[in-house]
Image (cartoon, coloured by chain):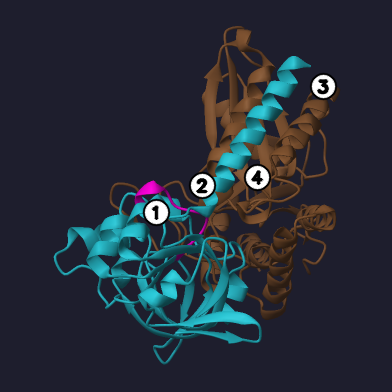
Chain colours: A brown, B cyan
Amino acid sequence: MSSNQKIVNAVAEYLDHISKVLPDDVVKALTRLRAEEKNKAALSVYDTMFRNMELAEELGKPLCQDTGIVQFKVVCGQDHPAIGEIGESLKEAVIKATKEAPLRPNCIETFDEINTGDNTGTGAPTIWWDIEPGRSDLEIYVYLAGGGCSLPGIAKVFMPGQGYEVIAPFAAERVTEMGLNACPPLFVGVGIGNSIETAAMNSKLALMRDIDSSNDNPNVAALEKELEEKLNYIGIGPQGLGGSSSVMGVNIVNTVRHPATLAVAVSFGCWCHRRGVISFDKDLNYSSKTHTKFAK
Amino acid sequence: MIETINEKKVITTPVTDEDIRSLKAGDVFYLTGDVLTGRDEVHKKTLREAGGFPADLRGGVIYHAGPIVREKEDGSFEMVSIGPTTSMRMEDFEPDFIKKTGVKIIVGKGGMGDKTAEACKELCVIHCAAPAGCAVIGAASVKEISGVYWPELGMPEAVWHLKVREFGPLIVTIDSEGCNYYKEKKREYTARRVEMLSESETK
């Protein structure tokens, strides 16, 4: 089999899997929130969610009908032998998974307003690249970006004088204004940077990180914890109907700012947070550290 | 018609005004009978075109949803996954949509706004929320897809005619008196947000 075909098959199989089985960290977070939940109606919502997870796996059907627009972040070793074929392979994998899983076709060509029917199109699937010198492996982060949780995404450039205190009210207002419809308990990704797109990209990368992980900088890690507690105090609960929590977790990814700017972005993941990492070695053997049930 | 089956309140279509009036914000029920899907484009097209909605919705149910459907070899359709989409996106169109179609039950995700609440009160209609992200359970209640209208809008946006049995649990979010459950909840959350932020300022 050609290396192109190997990647197509593996990624298509992985897309199929992550549309039907949640990553280990998300299941763990939902299990914890369900155990801590005190509201009776919220508990029955959790029961429905867990029943849906069981049925999706058992029947081999996508957990949610909105299988999103497929987004990839490719971290590719400079010496990986298949480096030149990855982009095309990912596109083919999306087309294959759309037919086989099946995934819902979600790509609308803007202004033409036509659904392309196969989840590819201008700029789709989304592919972000990192080329890593001195490495020969390949890691592909995969995210099914659903509409419901993409809708509340927001970014703004603040003046540095306003300080990092702007983050909590900025995120909290979005949670109460738009979060109820984004399928809570939410996963909150906060991005900090110098301009609108660096902050926005960082906020998406925050959603790629494990829910249980912490920022390397202890001050930022403390802010992650503080934001989580504050948002949970609001208590929008599962489905926004009220409960003991609002979020599965808060991750912050930060890069430098300009002396004159403080850009902040918030991206949201729904409770059905379908993302994972598939890792290949140079011979294209693969596995997934986020999905222990993913078979080779 | 409303009946209680295995301790579940089940409503069978077509729905009467009497059925609608008996449901209050916060109540939980299930639906059996005919349900038609329609979201963003369907609302716009229904209002724009003289012929309106492509099926009879009087006493009927519109479901804000874009399913995954598989076409079988014999040309019939299989429901793979179906769940609600954010109803609030339809807020600007919903009052006129209700007037034009005579729909009685709107099913979707989350709540809707004042315009829909007023139309619900005026025309004896309810909005209710289905469990979101639980699309396999949703598909299990679909017994048959009896047809599709406007397929040119694409799979998520087309009008799918579904035969459902005990579809739910559905929570009434706006009742026929205009009571808006999510709006009340939102007020609560906003109050706690303001409280939380003012506490951290005084620290």
Residue B109 within the magenta-colored segment of the rendering: yes
Earlier sequence position, callout 1 versus callout 2? 1
- Give the residue displayed 32% in from the left and 72% down from the top: B151
Residue found at the very far bottom of the displayed protein: B74
Q: Report how far apart the C-alphas of labels 1 and 2 lie in the structure.
A: 10 Å
Q: Chain of mark 1?
A: B
Q: Quadrant of residue A224?
A: top right
- Give the residue displayed 67% in from the left and 73% down from the top: A56
Q: Which residue is mark 1?
A: B117
Give the residue type that dot 1 points to: Ala
Q: Which mark is residue B183?
A: 2
Number of the front mark, 3 or 1 = 1
Q: Chain of mark 4?
A: A
Q: Position of residue A50 (x, y in %)?
A: 74, 67
B160 and B31: which is toward the camera: B31
Give the residue type that dot 3 points to: Asn
Q: Report how far apart the C-alphas of labels 1 and 4 lie in the structure.
A: 46 Å
- Give the residue displayed 72% in from the left and 66% down from the top: A44
